[in-house]
Image (spheres, grey):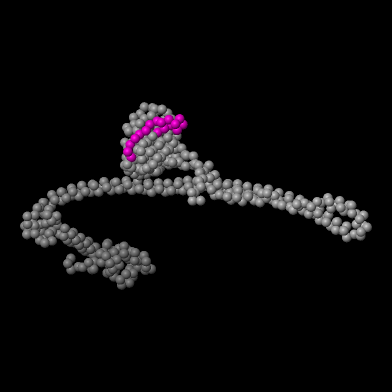
Amino acid sequence: MASISEEDLCCPICQEVFSDPVVLSCSHSFCKDCLKNWWTQKPTQQCPVCKRRSSKTDPPLNRVLKNLCESFLQHRDQRSSETSETSETLCSLHSEKLRLFCLDHQQPVCLVCRDSEKHTNHRFRPIDEAARQHKKKIQETLELLKKKLKVCKEDKVKFDQTAKHIKVQARHTENQIKEQFKKLHQFLEEEEEARMAALREEEEQKSRVMKQKMEALSREIAALSDTVRATEEELRAEDVSFLQNYKAAAERVHQRPLLEDPQLPSGALIEQVKHLGNLSFNIWNKMKDMVSYTPVVLDPNTANPYLILSEDLLSVREGELQQLPDNKERFNINYRAVLGSEGFTSGTHSWDVDVRNTTFWELGVLPESLMKIGDKVPGGTWGIWFCDHDTTLLCPVVRVYKKFRRIRVNLDWNRGEVSFSDPYTNTHIHTIRHTFTERMFPYFYSGENCPVTIFPMKVSVTVRQSKYN
């Protein structure tokens, strides 16, 4: 085998070691498939090397060559395996088998290495024992990585859901914005049309009056012109003729007394001030009848998945479980609450809530620190709650037993007070006192399918004269 090289055993077509070699009558050999493919592409069956035509469509197998090739491949694979095994298991310094593991150098060594100066006073373990211990360590670390991988995959699912929800939120918010502006545009268009109609009506009315005045003045001019012309003709007549017609001419002249010069009536012109004076302010002032202001708006990103918020974010009720992102601000699935969108760090703030149809509600304020806790608990809530049936609620809020239609919540952050009252009867319900040190958010809890709704405030416009005028 040593006298035969790999080149001698290669097919002239594919340049690889022969596979099922066949021999032609010209003594040239080829891989069976290589020759078949070659002949498929050629018009005649000739030898790819010497171009001699072959008389056999199916050349015989070259068994001797096949045996040589198989033996060569076997020896080559064996040498490759032996080389690989030697490089993996023998010491590169002493060509001895690696039987020990140096704990100090953290590497496999042979028995000669153990007794060498390089490893003096080092600690050793048998290869199998060291491998078992190190595999255990790696396995423990691997388990942590697997857990981390699982968490990352779960987080990726949450992130994907959040990304999709962002798209849904954006499209929904975009539609709401368009709807609001559509109403405002409609109001402005209707207001514009009404003011243009009023202008056209005034124009038509005053144009009609002026037309009547001008027609009357035209008739007067025509009559006076006739009188002047007739009188001038009388004056040009002979004396006798003039005197004969004098009486009629005098009567005709005296019938047209000299009137005062015609004057435009008062208020004849378009009252531009009425149409243009403070136009934008007047429209804005009128617009307040179609808009509302609410001191507290609900934040949907904090709402429990069982809560459904109204389109205007002023009402909340219980509903079916929704697939929402499990973001940090959101109340967990067991605590059906939602927060106001704005927190307060000073001043006095008040909001009214309609609770007339709800049999289970809770109102109050929540400190900002509890918003950052994944699983929120009501332990830091300052408020009151109502339930018309027996229940247990583990929180420091105060229970009320009377059914109310409306609850007014008043937060005085500076004085550290949260008070509750009935605005219909102006009756005080309860006051909680606490020293606030952080931002406080309006808090709403709904446990029924009937909505809890925040009332809008009445909008008014006050005009004051500037002290600098």
Regarding residue 322, the answer to whether it shows in the image is: no
Regarding residue 249, the answer to whether it shows in the image is: yes
Q: Which of 411 and 149 is in front in this view?
A: 411
Residue 15 is situated, as x and y percent measured from the top left of the image, at 28, 67
Given the current orientation, which residue lies at the most extreme right position?
Answer: 240
Residue 55 is situated, as x and y percent measured from the top left of the image, at 33, 68
Residue 252 is situated, as x and y percent measured from the top left of the image, at 85, 52
Residue 167 is situated, as x and y percent measured from the top left of the image, at 42, 48
Give the tally of numbered discs.
0
Q: Which of 281 and 102 is in front in this view?
A: 281
Q: Which of 31 and 124 is in front in this view?
A: 124
Q: In this view, does 205 lie to the left or right of 408?
A: right
- State yes or no: residue 292 in magenta: no
Which residues are drawn in magenta?
420-436
202 in relation to 446, above or below: below
- State yes or no: residue 431 in magenta: yes
Residue at the image position 34 percent from the left and 31 percent from the top: 393
| Among the 4 quarters of the image, the one containing residue 412 | top left
Residue at the image position 17 percent from the left and 61 percent from the top: 83
Q: Is residue 129 left or right of residue 214?
A: left
Q: Which of 108 and 160 is in front in this view?
A: 160
Quadrant location, the N terminus: bottom left
Residue at the image position 69 percent from the left and 51 percent from the top: 207
Residue at the image position 32 percent from the left and 38 percent from the top: 435
| Among the 4 quarters of the image, the one containing residue 430 | top left
| Among the 4 quarters of the image, the one containing residue 65 | bottom left
Q: Is residue 224 left or right of residue 104?
A: right
465 in relation to 22, above or below: above
